[in-house]
Amino acid sequence: MSKSSQFDAYHELLGIPPAEQPPNLYRLVGISLFENVHSVIERAADRQMSHLRSFQVGKHAVDSQKLLNELARARHILLDDAERAAYDAKLRKQLEPKAAPKPAPAAAPKPAAAKPTPVARPQQPAPVQPRPQVQQPLPQQPPAPQYPVYPELSAPASAFHSHTLGPAHGGNDSIMSPALVAAIVAGVVVSLGIIVLFVSQMGGSTPPVPVAIAPDVPAPPNLQPTIPQPPLHQVPGPPHPTIPPAAVPREMTPDPFVVPPASEPPPTPTTPESEPTEPVSEPVLESKREPLESHTWIELIPLVEFDHDLASGEWTRNGNQLSVTGIRNSRLRFPVILTNCSYDFETEFKLGVDHDDIHLIIPVGDQNVLVSTDSYGNRKYSYLDRVAGKEAWENPAAVVANLLQPNTLHRIKMSVRLTGDHAQVAYTLDGKQRYMYEGPTSDLQVAPAWSIGTKAQPALAIYDTPATFTTCRVKLLEGEGFYGRAAPLLQPIPERYAEMRATSLTSLTPAIKTHFEDKFGINAGTNPIINGQPCTDFVYAHAPSRLTYAIPPGTKAFTAMAYCARSGSVKFIVSADGQELYSVERRAIAPVAVNIPEGAKTLTLECDPLDRSWDDDSCWCFPAFRE
């Protein structure tokens, strides 16, 4: 994973310091090196992924998704004995200590440069006479040494070389003259003086003393102590109960769904009169994409994020298993993009005692198709639905038999091969190929009731039977596949709203309320699932419903998570004094954040059932006035 210059996701989100990056798979999962107990690996990977999911609403959503993708791949490799063995072999080679190079023989200290000794010429014999004693003058003070003086380095040996005069220089080998001793003492005194000057510079009590630096030696580091500067701003105010006291509240911007990048200056705060009055509708984000590995099985269940991938239904995850209740037409997308790709897709599942049909939705070229098993009359038709406009039971190529058994583990494999606009789609159940479609991709389509909002992602679906999926995986063979989402993503609630004081609507009584039959309550009924966790702070108001609340004084905004996973066919509307501020429709989960116009008296929350209302169990989760 790439590390930006401003945010280190490995370190900030998983506690992996830069010195250990990029981490090996064991470090990434958070287990000891070469751990091979499956239960330990599985629990550790699930723990890490659960932790990362807590960052998916906010500014680190993209970074956390990247790490989730890496963890999913690590989990798959470490839980597959063959792949783990191959990985361990490579890792051991990487961890082997490299043979240290033989140290080069230490270079002998270079003696001080001396004049070459002249070759003695033959001399004529002469009578021996005593050599006159010449008074040696005291040496002048030597110049400053031409090397940097560091406290941890000693001066070169040449700086303290003893100039003992030998016979060639007119000296004596065994006795040093007084002049020579004086020269040595003078050199030592000069060296001590330089050291004293350097130490005084270190202490900061006197102005720095310039030090001569050789041109080919880097300058010494700045040794002056750094004085910490106080923060530029301190904004007073009472802290939010869930925000640390040191947190500084930020001003609200006119558009609650535009979060400026960190590199840009913050926007100028606006007055309530300048805030927009036009309703906000379905602000979307573009999913970041990363290439899929080719010819490698990729586990998909760990990558699922319900807030982004849920189309409809009540889905939960337990470890590496997905479970769905028997809500009709439940659908869940996987965050991989397979447009114009050849690939294999596999899922292993088990149905309940009273089972019905089960479906897959898979991309084929630039289209997608519904794969039905045991569907329609007496649960006995299995084929691709809506081929050239024909439903599975109308197609003569359909398999007519009851293929699935209750409480039995089954495995479906779909093989998609593309040649231009022509496709081959093979269906294999429990190791036996049952049929193959060959034809143009343009003949394939999905009925509106099974739409998942995109043709590029695979998905699971059931009609009205509970099911548990133990494996879902994909292997890319040809083409460019990606991790990511083609279905539009809604912008999460900006973090600045969390820094405002909140008053939950579950603590207030609506001034006016209308709802479907008797289906209204505070924290009543089945708990909605938000970010994979049951929500315990919600207003249940089955569509059609309208709830009107008096706006408390000082209120600046309203936030909530609109939820209708059972049908996914509701339109959520937020209005102030009859003026629509926000709307979103046909989303199982949608974040809501709106600014309240100054002087507004009432806030109305409406759930419009659109084309049906019999299973529109709509809720407003975490609803709050913000001030």
Image (cartoon, rainbow, N blue to C red):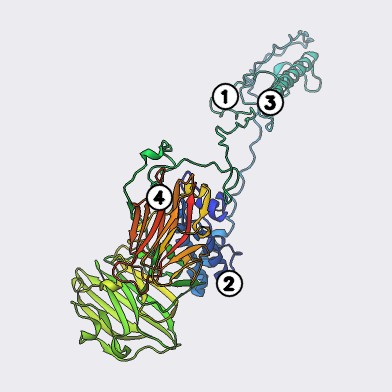
Residue holding disc 2:
36
| Nearer to us: label 1 or label 2 | 2
Q: Is residue 304 visible?
A: no
The type of residue carrying mark 2 is Asn
- Is 328 drawn above or below residue 168 in the view shown? below
Q: Position of residue 275 (x, y in %)?
A: 37, 42
Q: Residues within 10 Å of mark 2 (few under 14, many from 20)?
A: some
The type of residue carrying mark 4 is Val
Q: How many angstroms separate mark 4 from mark 1 (CA)?
A: 66 Å
Q: Which disc is residue 214 wearing?
A: 1
Q: How many angstroms separate mark 2 from mark 3 (CA)?
A: 55 Å
Q: Quadrant of residue 392?
A: bottom left
Which numbered disc, 2 or 3, marks the residue that appears first in the sequence?
2
Q: Position of residue 243 (x, y in %)?
A: 57, 49
Q: Residues within 10 Å of mark 4 (few under 14, many from 20)?
A: many
Residue holding disc 4:
594
Residue at disc 4, secondary structure: strand
Q: Residues within 10 Å of mark 1 (few under 14, many from 20)?
A: few
Which numbered disc, 1 or 3, marks the residue that appears first in the sequence?
3
Q: 269 and 11: which one is in front?
A: 269
